[in-house]
Amino acid sequence: MKTIENLLEEHPFFAGLDTEYLDTLSGCGQNVVFQVGDEIMRQGDPANYFFVIRHGLVSLLAHAPGRPPITIQTLQEGDILGWSWLFPPWLWQFGARADTVVRVVRIDAKCLRGKCEEDPVLGYELAKRFAKVMVERLAWTRMQLMKIYDPPEKR
Amino acid sequence: MVPSADAMESVPYVVGKVRRETRDTFTLDLFPANGQALGPFRPGQFNMLYVFGVGEVPISISGDPSDPGKMVHTTREVGLVTGAMKRLKQGMSVGLRGPYGTHWPTEESRGKDVLIVAGGIGLAPLRPAVYQVLANRHYYGRVALLYGTRAPEDILYGRELKSWRSNFDLEVYVTVDRASENWRGYVGVVPNLISKAPFDPTHVVAMICGPEIMMRFAVNALLKRGVDNAHIYVSMERNMKCALGFCGHCQLGPKFVCKDGPVFRHDEVAALMEQWEL
Amino acid sequence: MPLKNGVMEMARIETDGLAGLVSAILDVGYRLLGPALSDGAIVYKDLESAEALPAGQEDEQAPGIYRIQKGNSEALFSYIVGPHSWKRFLHPPRIRLACYDRELNPIPETDSEDKVQPLAFFGVRPCEIAAIRIQDQVFLEGPYIDREYESNRKNLLIVAVDCSRPAQTCFCASMGTGPSAHEGFDLALTEIQLEDEPYFLVRVGTEIGERLLEAVPHRPANAEEISQRNAVLARAERRLQRSLDTTGLPELLRRNFDHPRWEQTGKRCLSCGNCTMVCPTCFCATVEEVTDLTGDRAERWRTWDSCFTADFSYIHGGIVRHSTKSRYRQWMTHKLSTWVDQFGTSGCVGCGRCLTWCPVGIDITEEAAFIRSHDMQSKSDSRKRRDGNENH
């Protein structure tokens, strides 16, 4: 039976992180399982967690009034879900839904925020990693916006 | 050196079928009009298609290499000639010459994993490679196809993709840039699938075809996973008037896309793809 | 080059011998083409007799400038190359490729005038021989053969002439292509003008050349005449003002892809394409569709094209080389750099035409020299030098 610390250690997102910090994080972490169709986070709710996806497919959703939510990206094993916990107003910008059975380590953000303020090195290590994810997601999103598959006159 | 009867002369072919694939993509099934057929082709090669009085354009062959009697061309209406092609009817004639160009390394990748990455209409020049690999499946390791397009209604060869996916020994992942309300598949760009695709980075051959931006990102994702530049192949596209290396239009730096390509090993063109307005 | 006892054999002919040569060539049945003065420039046209040669014409050339006027001498080759090059006969500006009916069956040419009449070029400069050799590689030595070029090139008779009066725009010596012809000719002439009437020393290159020489009065050249020839050639070399340093040039241009000079020169360039039209090695072409009102037949015509045209690099909805800068760079780097990758030699023969006929006087030797003296050195990571003005 793996401990939370083992699971985090294995996850690519935390590669290279000091064991001491892995310990801190696992202290704030909990194993959670979502069933098909479960709402993992709701747009507009307080961002009290972020999720380390260990298994399964998650749809990142955008909600607009008067229409069903649209999937804007699919995340899967190896990905991180949720970064709104880092910045005020600490509210989810998007929703997320489990498309398959999804296993995550759910990290308590309120708990973690305090620890990052106390220990800036921990804060920096996490900020670096999240920034990397954001840069990559931004690149992907920009590519989605570029409408690269559209015929010329439509672009 | 191939002596040509006259290399710019087309052979008449007859339209057997015009199939609408998506809202702007269509496929022509063509057969020799007078029993004179073009030679066998290899996956990745193209023909020059001539529409009477309108013009001639290069189009990849997207049919089965083991059935060269039927020339299959999938294309999009993007100009005068392809617009005229879209309006062709069964029984009408087109001029064909070819096959031209370099081909996907389906033979060279025997004994390795195969990763096929296609974006949009880029699946069309890769389909013959899929056919060939599936027909000789025992030669290869893990085979995966990653396909991305704009939206669910733009998925090319949808039925075939589903049928390929139902093979136990072929993994097919389809993603879209923009989901529709009913879409339950992947959403996101194709290169994003590469980091998690099933292959051994030290023992794989990757074949990529799609918009240049997508190919560049896909290559980066592969390099990041430790795949060697010399095991990645891309298909480039440029304006062509002759396909014989004479008109000069298709030059990409020192390369003539018509005869040095369109399929290139990535290490040969990596620097060229980086240069703007080359 | 026929050698006798290890010494290059030369013959001397007089002006009437030269006229005889012209007649002999015509008698054999060649279509003879040679220089003529037309519309204020030396062009290549059908040559009917030696009298039609533009005697005494002297040209002055500089970037963007071409002037020609009659001088005092009666020399037959006192001028240098003009806007025409021999490619207009080997790789004609406009040819019909094919004609089809609606079922795509070919309709053969009705005018069965056999283009069997072989071509003869009279007064071919050494740089032009080099240019023909370069085009031979493009059209005859690749995976496909250009039938039109092959047919025109077959049995081509070349009567070369050494240059006695290079223009200021010439830089053949630095390209290894002149001012004297060493090979690739049937006959080579050097005009020597010491007395009132010029005489010619002739070198024989082939058996065909030898037979033609036999048809006209000639005698072996003596030592003094040979030394006079050497003096003419030495004088010609001294007249050369420009040079192009080709040491490591392909790599130099390759690593300076993002050099700011391209931007500067791109601003001067009008994208008019003159350089490509007059260049003896440029070969780009396009295909035009020609239909008639009945709609029963469609012709396809091949015409000269230029990489400077806006849609040369057009692919569905976009132009790859959008800016004039990128098109100028394409032309120059193809000519001096990527041509070497493609064909093993430089694409430039140093004829200087592109300097003369450029309306704004862009000088390819100056461009190359500038980049060489301001080499950006770093071979990797040209990203740093990417032009900030481009939208990407």
Image (tube, grey):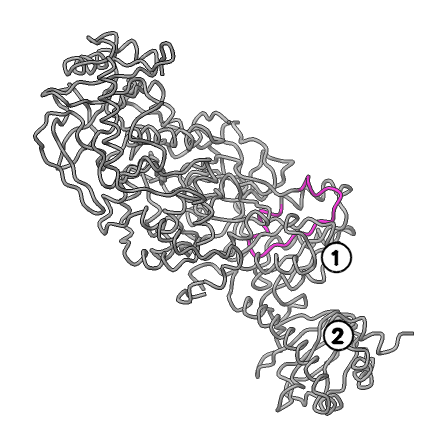
The verdict on residue C280 being magenta is no
What mark, if any, has residue C337 been given in the picture? none
Up-down relation of residue B25 to residue C12 (above or below): below
Quadrant assignment for the C terminus of chain C: bottom left
Most foreground residue, B233 or C252: C252
Please provide percent x and percent y for residue B90: 49, 41
Residue at mark 1 shares a chain with residue at mark 2: no
In the rendered structure, which segment of residues is drawn in magenta? B106-127
What mark, if any, has residue A14 been given in the picture? 2
Q: Amino acid at mark 1?
A: Pro
Q: CA distance from mark 1 to mark 2?
A: 22 Å
Under circle 2, the secondary element is helix
Residue shown at 51% from the left, 52% from the top: B272
Q: Amino acid at mark 2?
A: Phe
- In which quadrant of the rendered view does residue C49 lie? top left
Residue shown at 44% from the left, 33% from the top: B10
The verdict on residue B112 being magenta is yes
Up-down relation of residue B167 to residue C125 (above or below): below
Please provide percent x and percent y for residue C46: 19, 24
Mark 2 is surrounded, within 10 Å at the Cα level, by few (under 14), some (14 to 19) or many (20 or more) other residues, namely: some
Up-down relation of residue A29 to residue C9 (above or below): below
Under circle 1, the secondary element is loop
What mark, if any, has residue B198 been given in the picture? 1
Residue shown at 38% from the left, 38% from the top: C347
Up-down relation of residue C153 to residue B237 (above or below): above
Quadrant assignment for the N terminus of chain C: top left
